Image (cartoon, rainbow, N blue to C red):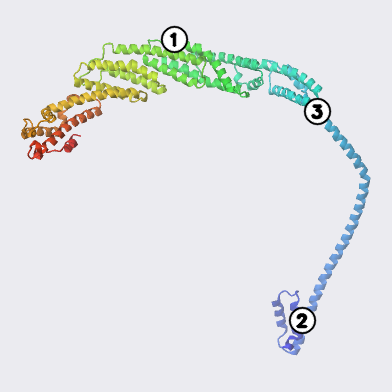
Amino acid sequence: MDVSHNNPIRLRINKIFDNHIVGDNSDALHSVSGLCVPNSAYSRRVLLNEIEKRDMLVNKTVLSEYNKVKDKIQLLLSTLKSLDTAVNDMSTRLSDTKTKTHHLITQTTKLKEERLKTEKKLVWVNAFIDKFQLSPDKIEYLYNVSVKTPLTYEFFGTLSQIENLYDSCKILVKCWYQTSAFDIMETVGLQQEVAIEKLYHWTIGACLSSDSPNNTLVPIALAKFQNRQVLFANIIDEYCSARKATIVQLFIDALTKGKDGSKPIEFYANDTKRYIGDILTWVYQIIPIEKEYLFTLFKHCNFPDKNQQIIDALTNIMEAICPLLKVRAELILNPDKDPLILWSITNLVLYYRDVLLTVIPKGHLINTLEELLKKSEEVFVITLDAKIQKELSHGVKAPPVDLNPSMVVTDLVSFLRDLLAVVNITNNVNNADRKMLTTHILDPLLHAINETACHLSSTDMSVYMLNCIYHIQCTLSLYTAMDEYNERLQAQSEAQIDTLTSEQASFLVANLNLGPIYTILQEKISGPLSAIPGMDTSTLKTFLNKFDLFLVSPEVYMLPQLNLLLSHSHKSLVKKRSFEVILAVYSQLFQAVHEPTNGYTEPNTVVRRTPDEVKKLLM
């Protein structure tokens, strides 16, 4: 084992393997395997020599490459030495230059500091001039502005600058520069008075123009007078006067010329309702326009009661059309008009008054509408009373054979429906309207119906009254405002239904021969009922056979007038209540027959139907 480890060939091969120059051991081994075929001492010596030759060749190659690297490094060192020499030379020259320019830099620094101080002083002077003095161009423009000279936004900038000068002067006074401050304030005060005077006259002239609502400078100008109440009020008065004239002209044009190709309002003067409606519509439409103009006019003002000022100005402007509105409305409010048209006009005026009250709480326009409303109501009541009196002058004519409401009743109810339809559209129902319609139409109509019904028989009167009341109720039920009066009519209907029920029950008792039986049952008779004449078994069987026929065909035993009732519910209610009377008598008879003390043998053969069975058949 030691010999094999000390073998020189093995040691040489291990040395080569240990050298990192050989990267792939497989190739080296392959080369060695080709050199040694027989394993002899000679072969091993030859292999050893060959390996040493190749090892030397590799070492020579490595040495040659290292020599090349060494030459490159030497060249790099030479270059670095040259660069070091150049850098040292440049450093020397820079040091000399720094020494020469140090004095120049010092002088430049001093001059720069002096220049900065001078510039600061110049800025301060310019700032003081800008802060406390107007430029010559602005002063010249300020003094040359007049009514005919166009006023621009530049004027308001100048005026704002003058106002700011006062605040700046106050700061000067606090800083103990009173003399300069008072001199500047005196000059600025004169300039401000000139500017305000020029602006006041220009604003008055602009407000008198018909195009003033579209002038964007007028609101800015008005805001400058917020603290000058007298001038501010004068401007608003002039604006209102100008808008009054404009609105009156627009109103006249709408009445006589029309607008945007439409026909003038006067063209429909014969159509009273449309005429008044178009006038009030025009007034309603012009108010938001004028209010918007006023909001634009006051948009730059910021005093607390601005909204109230706008409403007051709007009220003042709308006063202009009141005389024209009143004259034209009064011309058509005559008693010769149809009451329905006058009622429509009354509700139109009431509707627009309520709408305008939300915009203009008070004023001449509202008062004018109140006067027109009062006059319209008065004329309407006069014409309404005349119409009702004419219709009812000869009383309600006798009802037709079918006991339906007469022509006068149907006409007046139809007229009432038309009046309520107008009220329902405008949603202006109030207690006064209800009371007026009740007092002037319904109460006289019901009184006339009662007078006519008094000449009829009891049954005919109840049927006729129920038909008339039902006809009226059908109309009033469409309008919730008349629910209270409908309840009164319902109470009258109940009274007539009770009367008709009594008549029908009497008719049934008479036709069924139930009267004697009912009388005997109500009397407290001692002894058995079967022994009483009329209550014996044979008589009861005869009655019950007839009663069975009634149960089969109850319609045969109804009053003929019941078929003339317009309301099916009324008819059903009368039948139900009258049948309840008959059922109550039958129940008493059933109990009496089945009572052992009354002496009826086999009561089930006498009275075959129980009250429940009879009730099921009738109800």
Q: Give the Cα distance between marks 1 and 3.
A: 74 Å
| Disc number lying in front (2 or 3) | 3
At label 3, the amino acid type is Asn
Which quadrant is the C terminus positioned in?
A: top left
571 sits left or right of 233 in the view: left
Please state if 542 lies on the left or on the right of 406 as rendered. Answer: left
- Residue located beneath label 1 in the image: 331
Q: Which residue is disc 3 drawn over? A: 126
Residue 553 x %, y %: 15, 32
Q: Nearer the viewer, residue 440 or 71?
A: 440
The answer to whether residue 509 shows anywhere in this view is yes
* Residue pictured at 40% horizontal, 12% vertical: 378
Judging by the rendered image, the residue that carries numbered circle 2 is 51
Displayed quadrant of residue 24: bottom right
Would you call the spot at circle 2 few (<14 residues within 10 Å), some (14-19), or many (20 or more)? some
39 left or right, relative to 541: right
Q: Amino acid at mark 1?
A: Leu
